[in-house]
Image (cartoon, rainbow, N blue to C red):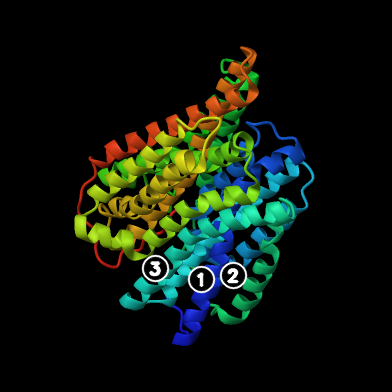
Amino acid sequence: MSHSIDASKRWLALIILCLGELMIVLDTTIVNVALPSIRTDLAFSETALVWVVNAYMLTFGGFLLLGGRLGDLFGQRKLFLLGIVIFTGASLACGIANSQALLITARAIQGIGGAVVSAVALSLIMNLFTETGERAKAMGIYGFVCAGGGSVGVLLGGILTSTLSWHWIFLVNLPIGVAVYAICLRLLPVGHPQTDIKHMDIGGALTITAALMLAVYAIVNGHQAGWQSVETLTLLALSIALLIGFLIIESRVPAPLVPLRFLRLRNVAIVNIMAVLWAAAMFAWFFISALYLQLVLNYSALQVGLAFLPSNLIMAVLSLGVSAKIVMRFGIRPPLVIGLLLGASGLGLFAFAPVTGNFNLHVLPGMLLLGFGAGIAFNPLLLAAMGDVSQEESGLASGIVNTAFMMGGALGLAILASAAAALTYNLLDQGIDPIIALNNGYRLAFGLGALAAIIAALLGFAVKVELPTAGSKVNAPH
């Protein structure tokens, strides 16, 4: 399906679609800077605070593929507008939240709206730009927005939290959402839904999301409830049962979210494991380092935003064509492995960060390494997954990796944050100074994140090195 629209309106539509996507991308990073303020204001515990991030990531990852299928069934324009409404309304609920339950619930709904917007925006761009050169340029702009949004989010989060309050990191979405909706209503062509799709894998999306949410909840609360308690073991057993149910559903439905035959392909299987490990490391870095800077080094929210800026700018610049050129020059495997090792090195440096850390010595070097590592590795990671599939299925393959990335981030963050909290509490029980105990917990999380990145890098040696066919589309992780 392609849309009939003149050239000037196509590029204007791209700008509006990218603005809508920017709003979604902002919420993956803007929250991290405000976490200490949210924790204090709403009395979150260290482990429960993880849900402010995970509630969004879990529903985003769970409904990302389903959102694209719903767009095919009901019309991409209609679903894009609905996603904007859901996301903007949930942002308002987050902004006025005065309890933990309301904030976490609203963040979960934000994730659903964000998944729909992201999935349908990609499809709309692919349908608006059918000529190879224009499509490549449009996707390059879209990829730059996805990567650059991280930089904007971290800095904007610091500014809003410092000058106003954490509530405004969500309320800032309202005028953007209203503007995007109003302009898209007039600009985007109506299009025609694909009426031949009769079966939607709603059961698959619900079971995998529920399985992961139960697993994350069990891990986050494992220290408090006890790792061998009936509650923890029951939740983990239910999670495993739901995961098995998901696999059964995927093997039987006509249009599965994750065709199981994909997982039998060498590159797709390896890359999905790598995506889970790398996401665990990346999201732990964003989450834990923001807490380290504010709670250990006493940085203000604005200073935290500025501290993240170098790494996010590097990631944005590398994503705007540089990473693709590196792949074309050296192939998939070298930049993939080197990028992951650079990221692991950055996390390794944070694992040695002292209580009296200095920005130039103990923060900036790790930030730079992580910026270069992430910026170099993302593109070949997705290209490696698509090397085993046809051009027609490349979008689905990259979407599966994108989903694995979001789910891996949520699960990995829960594990690493819980490990950090467990060590901190153990040291406090031994009479260790609270700041030293807190810092040791963070250092453990950074070290585990570095280990995950190293394992991902080693797996990179096992991927096949053929590049996917020209014209394959790449859905950048958010």
The residues tagged by marks 3 and 2 sit, at their Cα atoms, a distance apart of 25 Å
> Which numbered tag is attached to residue 140?
3
Q: What x and y, as percent, mark residue 131?
A: 34, 78
Badge 1 or badge 2: first in the primary sequence: 2
Q: What amino acid type should be assigned to the residue bearing mark 3?
A: Gly
Near mark 3 (Cα within 10 A), the count class, few <14, some 14-19 or many ≥20, is some
Residue tagged by mark 2?
78
- Helix, strand or loop under label 2: helix
- Helix, strand or loop under label 1: loop
Q: What x and y, as percent, mark residue 179?
A: 66, 73
Taking the image as shown, residue 418 lies to the left or right of residue 371, namely right
Q: What amino acid type should be assigned to the residue bearing mark 2?
A: Lys
Mark 1 or 2: the one toward you: 2
Question: Is mark 1 in CB contact (under 8 Å) with mark 2?
Answer: yes
Q: Give above or below for 364 relative to 80.
A: above
Q: Give above or below for 179 relative to 451.
A: below
Q: What amino acid type should be assigned to the residue bearing mark 1?
A: Pro
Q: Residue 20 or 251: which is nearer the viewer?
A: 20
Taking the image as shown, residue 475 lies to the left or right of residue 461, namely right
Determine the image quadrant of residue 44: top right
The residues tagged by marks 1 and 3 sit, at their Cα atoms, a distance apart of 27 Å
Q: Residue 194 or 345: which is nearer the viewer?
A: 345
Mark 3 or 2: the one toward you: 3
Badge 1 or badge 3: first in the primary sequence: 3
The quarter in which the N terminus is drawn is bottom left
Q: Give above or below for 203 relative to 129.
A: above
Q: What x and y, as percent, mark residue 309?
A: 51, 54
- Helix, strand or loop under label 3: helix
Residue tagged by mark 1?
193
